[in-house]
Image: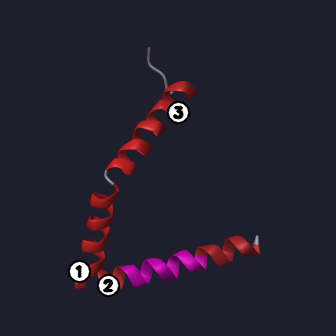
Amino acid sequence: MNQERLSEVAAEAKREYYRRYREKNRERYNQTARNWRAKPENKAKIKQYQIEYWERKAKEEDN
């Protein structure tokens, strides 16, 4: 059975699994993100990501 995509039922089960996993491990996820943002070498990346995000949002608003 070689399918390209998951069935809708399987896709929903997968989404639900990851949703529960993220809820259960929320603090760990948040701490990892805080640690990444706190590193000096990532400060420039954060600024660049923010610029790209808002430029993309402005372009979407135009369309």
Q: What residue type is labelled 2?
A: Lys
- Quarter of the view holding residue 49: bottom left
Helix, strand or loop status at disc 2:
helix
Cα separation, mark 3 vs mark 1, equals 36 Å
In the foreground, 52 or 24: 24
Asked if 2 appears above or below 43 in the picture, the reply is above
**Number of numbered discs present?**
3
Work out which quarter of the rendered image holds the N terminus and state it.
top left
The verdict on residue 54 being magenta is yes
**Residue located at (60% from left, 74% from top):** 56
Kindly indicate whether the residue at mark 2 contacts the one at mark 1 (C-beta within 8 angstroms): yes
- Asked if residue 49 lies in the magenta stretch, the reply is yes
User: In the image, which residues are magenta?
Assistant: 46-55
x%, y% of residue 14? 44, 34
Label 1 sits on residue? 39
Horizontal relation, residue 60 to residue 18: left or right: right
Q: Nearer the viewer, mark 2 or mark 3?
A: 3
Label 2 and label 3: CA atoms lie apart by 36 Å
> Who's the residue at 35% across and 56% down the image?
26
Q: Where is residue 39 in the image (x, y as percent from the top left)?
A: 23, 80
Number of other residues with Cα within 10 Å of mark 3, as a class: few under 14, some 14 to 19, many 20 or more: few
Image quarter where the C terminus lies is bottom right
Which of disc 1 and disc 3 is earlier in sequence?
3
CA–CA distance in space, label 1 to label 2: 7 Å
Residue that carries the numbered disc 3 in the rendered image: 12
Q: Name the residue under label 2.
A: 43
